Image (spheres, helix red, strand yellow):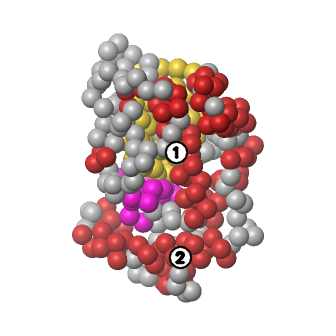
Amino acid sequence: MTSNALSMARSIERPTRNAMLQRDPSVHRFWMENRHLFGDAWAEWEASNSEDLNVLSSSLYDDKLRTAVESAWDDPSKETAVRDLWKEVFPGVYEAQFFNPERLAVLRTYLDHVANAEIPLRPPYGISLNRGGAMLDSRSEGYLAAPNFQAFYQNLMNAYMRPISRMLFPDIVGYDSQTFGFSIQWQPDTDTSLRAHTDASSVTLNINLNLPDEAFSGSGVRFFDRETQQISELTFAPGTALIHHGSVPHESMPITEGERSNFVLWLYGESGAIPQPQRAPEAISAEERWSVPTVGSDGFAPF
């Protein structure tokens, strides 16, 4: 690690907002040429702020979910306890308490420190540019490379999201080896909504990171059912999550008051492969559901 990586990263000249929005080739070169510098800077930042940063651990998860997931990893035949925590709130959309609301402040404080670290961090272009959003996966340019966060993120994807997705959506098996994630912070009068779309994912997990005392108005997620033409706008409480096929059309409605913070996490196959609609699911055992693919990251990033 470069001993002064942190100061170098903080002083480096950044691409302009317009260049980032235009996806100028110089922006790609900026992230690629400085990838190792920024990685070293995040590690140095985390080490130098260890007294102020709470460790991101499994204690952040909802107690019931954590207990059920840990039990299923010990004995996959007990996975029903995990499945029972997820309620279908719209055709093909499930909800559960994911993080413990009383512990969310630990994660949010960490992310607040990240936002103030002054290390270049690439936001999710076109969703929430320079307003608190960040790329989370190592496949992305300018991602949040802090070691503690990466360990937490990878455990979330491997130990929680993938086996839960395989239980709820068995057709995605074989299209779930790759991970992708970003954060968003919605604010009134800035990026207030996201029009109707589908995701380039097999499965999408959307987790509300708002604290119990952080009220907001608007910003529900509206879902559309192609078969029945049903439309429903869902809101979710602090620490709760919605999970669905990426192919389910949805949109985020305008936020009118307060702020909303969330993680958006994806699974898909190599080179962005996703299952075809109505694909017959593969029959796999519980032991196979509760396993981590041996395929490594292919480096493909949807955006």
Q: Is residue 139 one of those drawn in magenta?
A: yes
Question: Within 10 angstroms of label 1, few (less than 14), some, or many (20 or more) residues?
Answer: some
Location of residue 73 by image quarter: top right
Earlier sequence position, callout 1 versus callout 2? 2
Q: Kindly tell me whether residue 268 is visible in this rendering.
A: yes
Picture coordinates of residue 268, whole percent (x, y): 36, 41
Location of residue 147 by image quarter: bottom right
For numbered disc 1, what is the local secondary structure? helix
Residue nearest the observer in this picture, 84 or 101:
84
45 left or right, relative to 63: left
Picture coordinates of residue 246, whole percent (x, y): 37, 34
Question: Within 10 angstroms of label 2, few (less than 14), some, or many (20 or more) residues?
Answer: many
- Outermost residue, left direction? 25
- How far apart marks 1 and 2 lie (CA) works out to 26 Å
| Vertical arrangement, residue 130 with respect to residue 251, above or below | below
**Residue drawn 75% across the image and 70% down it:** 51
Q: Which residues are magenta?
A: 124-142
Q: In the image, what residue type sits under mark 1?
A: Asn
For numbered disc 2, what is the local secondary structure? helix
Residue 158: assigned label: 1
Q: In the image, what residue type sits under mark 2?
A: Ala
**Residue drawn 40% across the image and 81% down it:** 13
**Residue drawn 29% across the image and 41% down it:** 273
Q: Is residue 264 one of those drawn in magenta?
A: no
* Between marks 1 and 2 in the image, the one whose residue lies nearer the viewer: 1
Q: Tell me the chief SS of the magenta region.
A: loop
Residue 41: assigned label: 2
Picture coordinates of residue 84, whole percent (x, y): 62, 21
67 left or right, relative to 143: right
78 left or right, relative to 281: right
